[in-house]
Image: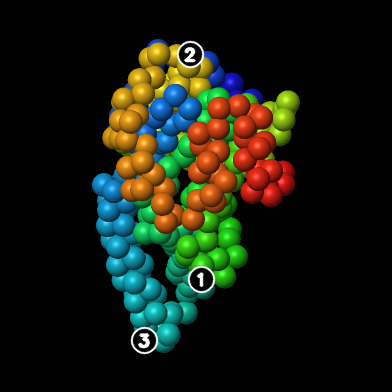
Amino acid sequence: MPSQYQPQIFGWISDLDKGGNYLTGADDRLLYANDNYCAFIRKTKSDQFFYLFLFCIVLIGYIFAMSIYSYFFFDVIKIDDITILFILNAGMFLFTFVIYSTILPEFYQNIFTRRGSPIIFNRKTGKVYINESYFFNFKVLRNPLTFLHPNKKRIKEYDWAHLQGVVVHNFSRYSLNTTILMVCKPHSHKTIDHILLDPLRVGIGSYLVWGWVNNFMCANKLAGLNDGKYKWEQETQFKEKIIKGQGWPEWMVEAFNATSQAELAEIKQRHHITE
């Protein structure tokens, strides 16, 4: 049975249900939680170093492949067989496309991700806030000029009601799963954006953060407010270490703690924010 959210994302495993969930675990992704909002990290430092290491390995392989390709192509060795030439050209084109569409964006995502790109959930207003690298998105083809702006970000506010969870896999033998939030048009299953929630977990690991977030948004006590790296009374330290200096708009930082739609509207009005 395919996903109800269309267009369906590549590698789809299952759609996730909202509401209270007993399959829950904050793990090391939860940074901070109080009675108003919680903050989850998307990239741990160990993940970033690991994928940067893989990028270096792939880059070395690419340079080696280009050297061999040049050796054959530029008349160092004469090749009259059209089939061999076609295979060489097709192979290098495919390798280059993979580097450009997946490996290079992953490199940018990891090296220019600051403090884990936390995602903020406010359960009093039902809003979700992201401040992340542009390369967190799910585009395959990008304008090459975007790579000249590595610090490009998207900073957005979403409605929790419009976000739906799905799990996808990476087709590796390690069966790593990723939880993605599908941003849907109101009152529809048509997706207009994607947000990475919990990347690359083994087995049911990807379901645990989804469960914790749902419990938090439902005010279920299974989501403990002291489960994170920073305890609930350490909000000042959390904002100083994680939020400050990362380009979060002042109004949005205030909105983290908004306790109602009316208070959120007052914050936006005071900062001249238009929808």
Q: Which residue: 47% across, 79% down?
A: 80
Q: Residue at 34% of width from left, 72% of height from top?
A: 63
Q: CA distance from mark 3 to mark 1?
A: 35 Å
Q: Is residue 116 visible?
A: no
- Say whether residue 110 is left or right of residue 258: left
Q: Earlier in the sequence, mark 3 or mark 2?
A: 2
Residue nearest the observer in this picture, 108 or 71: 108
**Kind of residue at disc 2:** Gly
- Against 104, residue 165 (above or below) is above
Image coords of residue 56 (percent x, y): 30, 62
Q: Count neighbours of disc 3 (C-alpha within 10 A) and say few if under 14, some if 14 to 19, many if 20 or more.
A: few
Q: Alpha-carbon distance for marks 3 and 2? A: 66 Å
Helix, strand or loop for disc 3: loop
Nearer the camera: disc 3 or disc 2 = 2
Residue at x-position 51% and y-position 37%: 256
Foreground of the two, 235 or 67: 235
Give the labeled residue for mark 3: 76
Q: Tell me which corner region of the image, top left, top right, bottom left or bottom right, holds residue 43.
A: top left
Amino acid type for the residue under numbered disc 3 = Val
Residue lying at 27% horizontally and 53% vertically, measured from the top left: 49
In the picture of the structure, the residue carrying the numbered disc 1 is 148
- Mark found first going from the N terminus, 2 or 1: 2
Label 1 amino acid? Leu
Exactly how many numbered labels are in the figure?
3
Instruction: Please name the colour scheme applied to the rendered image.
Output: rainbow
The Cα–Cα distance between marks 2 and 1, rounded to whole angstroms, is: 44 Å
Instruction: Estimate the x, y position of residue 140 in percent, counting from the top left.
Output: 56, 54
Q: Earlier in the sequence, mark 3 or mark 1?
A: 3
Instruction: Look at discs 2 and 1 and give the one toward the viewer.
Output: 2
- The residue that label 2 is drawn on is 20
Residue 92 vertical position relative to residue 170 in the rendered view, above or below: below
What mark, if any, has residue 237 been given in the picture? none
